[in-house]
Image (spheres, rainbow, N blue to C red):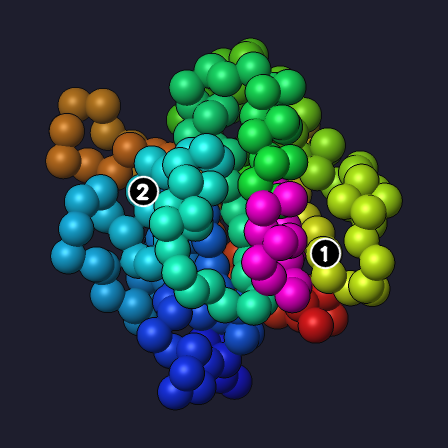
Amino acid sequence: MNLHGGNSLTMAIRPMIFGHQLLGDSHMLNVAEMLGYQLDWIQPDSIGLCISGQTIIGLRRRLQNTLEINEKVILMIGNNEFQRGLDQETIKMNFLHLVEYLLGRVRKLVILTTVPSPEMIDGEAYRITSMGFNRWILSVNWWDLMQLSQPGRIAVVDVSSQFVNYHDGILEEYFQPSNKYNTNAPDGLSLNKYGIQLLLDTLEKNSHSLY
């Protein structure tokens, strides 16, 4: 299977999967690395518009300064807002502005629910905001809200539920373990290779939503 799904014209736009460009924060960055893409030679760590620490507003600003993006994109973002304690209504408003902007530039937008962090989920504010945001994404009638006239321009795929157990706890086996005594150790926020593969498998199972 050609996961990248690109040709000579689209391969300059990266990272790609199933013919879609990935947009987002460190989760999307880690997916891109597992797909074989190399990090850009800039800081913070990035591959295209998948950037470590990126926020919703930050992505929109970068998009406004980006001349060319793919006509089909997959978006997952929001975890940095949860970690910084931004209130849920502000996150939703910023996300709606981002979606509206993207729909003005792309033919197909696939929204992924945001993978929560096992290191942060014990915090009540983080739990309420992250879980609430994902439930909101799944509940919105995007077709009516964005007043879309063409069928199939926007789709939602729930990936976050794959990492949550019945008690809203996080399945930690899918994340890099943290070590608070070692500053060079993983921070416990990022998916490990099994978590990234689960995310990719979930996308593949929902491939009908991508087209």
Secondary structure state at the residue bearing disc 1:
strand
* Label 2 to label 1: alpha-carbon separation: 24 Å
Decide: few, some or many residues near mark 1? Use Cα within 10 Å; few <14, some 14-19, many ≥20.
some
Say whether residue 129 is visible: no
Badges 2 and 1: C-beta atoms under 8 Å apart?
A: no
Decide: few, some or many residues near mark 2? Use Cα within 10 Å; few <14, some 14-19, many ≥20.
some
Residue lying at 23% horizontally and 48% vertically, measured from the top left: 45
Q: Position of residue 164 (x, y in %)?
A: 61, 38
From what the image shows, is residue 122 above or below residue 152?
A: above
Q: Position of residue 18 (x, y in %)?
A: 55, 74
Q: Position of residue 112 (x, y in %)?
A: 61, 49
Is 112 inside the magenta-drawn segment? yes
Does label 2 or label 1 sit earlier along the sequence?
2
From what the image shows, is residue 52 above or below residue 121?
A: below
Residue lying at 57% horizontally and 41% vertically, measured from the top left: 98
Is 188 inside the magenta-drawn segment? no
Q: Quadrant of residue 173?
A: top left
Does residue 198 appear to the left or right of 39 in the view shown? right
Q: Which residue position holds label 1?
A: 155
Q: Position of residue 93 (x, y in %)?
A: 62, 27
Q: Residue furthest top?
A: 124
Residue lying at 19% horizontally and 36% vertically, measured from the top left: 185
Circle 1: residue type: Ala
Circle 2: residue type: Ser
The region drawn magenta spans 100-113
The numbered dot on residue 179 is none
Residue lying at 70% horizontally and 72% vertically, measured from the top left: 211
Q: How many marks can you see?
A: 2
From what the image shows, is residue 209 above or below residue 155?
A: below
Q: Which residue position holds label 2?
A: 52
